[in-house]
Image: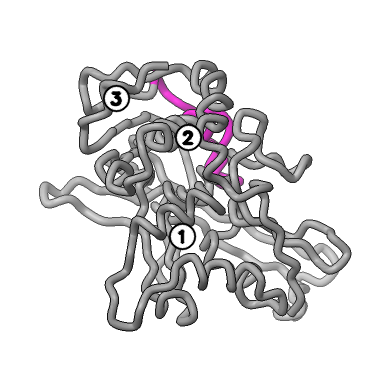
């Protein structure tokens, strides 16, 4: 796997055309008090946000974790993360699956303050000192390398005054253009008591729903300049780039059932938009390369690489 052509590039930009796996309709993400995020371009083109950047970060993380084995999927074994268990040692969650990664309350807000103390010590800065992002990057590499790609905001006042924040290096979202609304609906029938109290679950309940049709595109942007700016060295940069490519291709292969009514598939090949000279390695090639890339920087991870926090409310 050759990543050398990316060494001086500021961004890697990939796009994938998607389509419903069956039929023509799909259900986008919805937002409280808003519903589907519809908008128009300046030229009047009707657009729709199918999946937001924050949701896509969670989906790209999910394809890395084997929920049955409660461990990284095979090519990623040995990467650092923070696991949360109950008092009996039963797994509860971990920094890979938590929406805010290391800023999860299950890591920082329970009775077990050991990990909070670690972060406080390793990220300590003076009250009037600037935030040291290089130190933050080194700490994330040690405990939760995943946060180097998807960003983190350690909002606890005990940790550098709540100022430790790292933006996403890998940003992804899905949009649809030239969209039209497919309006439909139905009725929940109550054959015994059609006019019953619907507030209690009885009676006939009509409902409507809106799905959409349109041209769906997934966008993936890897900020290579930001990764180099972490100052972690070329081996870590290669690992982070390979991990990002793994996440993207694994998501496009396994993770496109976004919702019950939004089951998508790749239409054509994943396209490299920039840099034009970069040849995208196949998923198998990335999977074969990752164990050695992990081994090359494993001495910079926590030992053992999985840090455990016991959660008690």
Q: Earlier in the sequence, mark 3 or mark 1?
A: 1
- For this view, does 42 lie left or right of residue 99? left
Contact? badges 3 and 1 (CB < 8 Å)? no
- Helix, strand or loop at label 2? It is helix
Classify 10 Å Cα crowding around label 3: few (below 14), some (14-19), many (20 and above).
some
- Helix, strand or loop at label 3? It is strand
Q: Which residues are magenta?
A: 248-269
Residue 181 image point, x, y percent:
38, 49
Q: Say which quadrant the N terminus sits in.
A: top left
The magenta stretch spans residue 263 = yes
Q: Nearer the viewer, mark 1 or mark 2?
A: 2
Classify 10 Å Cα crowding around label 2: few (below 14), some (14-19), many (20 and above).
many
| Near-viewer residue (40 or 7) | 7
The magenta stretch spans residue 221 = no
**Residue 243 shows which numbered tag?**
2
Q: Say which quadrant the C terminus sits in.
A: bottom right
Residue at image coords 67%, 55%: 307
Tell me where residue 200 sits by quadrant. Answer: bottom right
Classify 10 Å Cα crowding around label 1: few (below 14), some (14-19), many (20 and above).
some
Q: Nearer the viewer, mark 2 or mark 3?
A: 2
Q: Which residue carries the number 3 mark?
A: 272
Contact? badges 2 and 3 (CB < 8 Å)? no
Residue 108 image point, x, y percent:
60, 73
């Amino acid at each position: 796997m050759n990543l050398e052509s990316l060494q001086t590039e500021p961004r890697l930009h990939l796009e994938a055309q998607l389509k419903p796996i069956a039929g023509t309709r799909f259900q986008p993400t919805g937002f409280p008090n808003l519903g589907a995020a519809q908008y128009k371009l300046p030229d009047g083109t009707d657009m729709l946000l199918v999946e937001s950047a924050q949701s896509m970060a969670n989906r790209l993380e999910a394809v890395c974790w084997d929920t049955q084995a409660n461990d990284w999927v095979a090519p990623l074994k040995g990467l650092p993360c923070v696991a949360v268990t109950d008092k009996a040692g039963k797994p509860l969650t971990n920094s890979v699956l938590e929406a805010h990664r290391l800023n999860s309350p299950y890591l920082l807000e329970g009775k077990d303050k050991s990990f909070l103390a670690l972060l406080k010590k390793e990220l300590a800065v003076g009250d009037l000192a600037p935030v040291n992002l290089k130190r933050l990057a080194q700490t994330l590499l040690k405990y939760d390398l995943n946060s180097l790609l998807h960003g983190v905001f350690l909002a606890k006042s005990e940790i550098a005054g709540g100022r430790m924040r790292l933006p996403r290096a890998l940003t992804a979202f899905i949009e649809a253009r030239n969209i039209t609304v497919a309006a439909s609906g139905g009725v929940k029938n109550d054959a015994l008591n059609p006019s019953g109290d619907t507030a209690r679950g009885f009676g006939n309940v009509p409902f409507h729903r809106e799905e959409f049709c349109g041209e769906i595109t997934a966008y993936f942007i890897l900020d290579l300049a930001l990764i180099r700016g972490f100052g972690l060295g070329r081996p870590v940069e290669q690992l982070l780039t390979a991990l990002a490519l793994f996440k993207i291709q694994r998501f496009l292969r396994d993770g496109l059932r976004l919702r019950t009514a939004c089951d998508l598939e790749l239409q054509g090949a994943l396209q490299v938009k920039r840099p034009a000279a970069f040849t995208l390695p196949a998923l198998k090639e990335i999977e074969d390369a990752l164990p050695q890339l992990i081994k090359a920087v494993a001495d910079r991870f926590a030992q053992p690489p999985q840090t455990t926090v016991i959660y008690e409310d």
